Amino acid sequence: MADPIHQFEIKKIAVLGHIGPYEIALTNSAVFMIAAVVTIVGFILLATSGRSLVPGRLQSLAEITYDFVADTVRSTAGKEGMKFFPFVFSIFTFVLVLNMFGMIPGFFTVTSHIVITGALALLVILVVIIYGLYKNGFKFFKLFWPSGVPMFVMPMIVLIEILSFLSRPLSLSVRLFANMLAGHITIKVFASFIGLLATSLGVAGWALGILPFGMLIALTALDLLVAFLQAYVFAVLTCLYLNDAIHPGH
C-alpha cells in the first residue's frame, strides 16, 4: 500500500541563496502558494476587465464571491468591519484556492502543513492586536475584563479570557491543518486499498473494490465540501476576532 504521508512531503526545487547559515530555497509549497496568488489575481482581473451591465459567467462568479465575503464581514463584524474586507477577502480566497489545489491529483496540499496555517493564524491575531490597541488604546484590554462580573471571581475570569485569546491562533491553525490532512490521508488509504485488492486478487479484487471505490467517490465529494467550509470557517473566525478589536467591550 502506498504511503499516505508521502503526499505531504515538502521538496526543494531550487536554492535561491543563503542568509548566514540559513538556506533560502524554492519548495513545492512555495510554488503552489505563488500559483494560488497568481490564480486569484488573474481571475479577478479577467472577471472584472469587461464590467458589463449584464455580467458573464466569470464576472458573476467574482460578484458572488465578493458579496459572499462582504455579507460574512457585515454579519460578524458589523459595517465598521468592512474596512477589513480586503484582508478577509484575501484570506478566504487564498485558503480556498490552496484547499482546492490540494484536491487535484498530483498537486500539493499547502494547508496540510501547520507551519502554513499557523502563519496565517498568527497574521490574523497580530492584525487584531495591533488594530485593537491602535483604535482603543488600553480600552482594548476590556476584552479580558468582562463587565458585570463579581470581583471575587474576576481573577479566574480574566485568566480564562487570556487563555482563550492565546488559544485562538492554535485553534485557527489546527482546525484547518487537521481537516485537510485527515481528509487527504483517508482518500489516499481508500485509493491504495482498491489497488491492493486488484493486484492481489485479480478479477475478484476488482469486484470487491466496487465498495471502497464508491466510498472513495463519496469521500472526495465530502473533502471538496470540507475544503470550502474550512476556508469559510477561517474567514468567519477572522471576522469574529476582528470584531473584538473593533468592539473590545463585552
Image: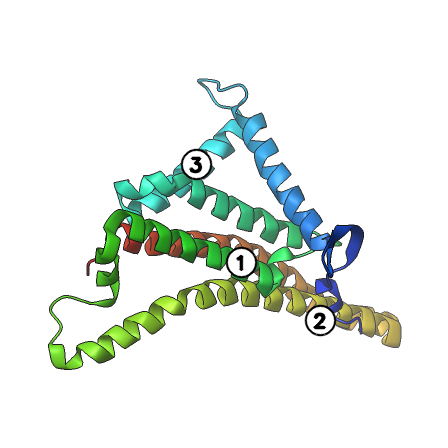
Q: Residues within 10 Å of mark 3 (few under 14, many from 20)?
A: some
| Residue in the picture at 27% in, 41% down | 80
Whether residue 199 is visible to the viewer of this picture, yes or no, is yes
Task: Indicate the quadrant where residue 206 lies.
Answer: bottom right
Q: CA distance from mark 3 to mark 2?
A: 37 Å
Which disc number belongs to residue 189?
2
Q: Secondary structure at mark 1?
A: helix
Q: CA distance from mark 3 to mark 1?
A: 24 Å
Is the residue under label 1 in contact with that under label 2 (CB below 8 Å)? no
- From the viewer's perspective, is residue 145 above or below residue 43? below
Of 80 and 130, the residue lying toward us: 130
| Residue in the picture at 12% in, 77% down | 151
Is the residue under label 1 in contact with that under label 3 (CB below 8 Å)? no
Q: Secondary structure at mark 2?
A: helix
| Residue in the picture at 51% in, 27% down | 59
> Which of the marked residues, 3 or 2, is nearer the chain's N terminus?
3
Identify the residue under disc 3: 66
Q: CA distance from mark 2 to mark 1?
A: 29 Å
- What amino acid is labelled 3 in the image? Tyr
- What amino acid is labelled 1 in the image? Ala
Of 103 and 170, the residue lying toward us: 170
Left or right: residue 236 compared with residue 207: left
- What amino acid is labelled 2 in the image? Val
> Which of the marked residues, 3 or 1, is nearer the chain's N terminus?
3
Identify the residue under disc 1: 119
Q: Nearer the viewer, mark 2 or mark 1?
A: 1
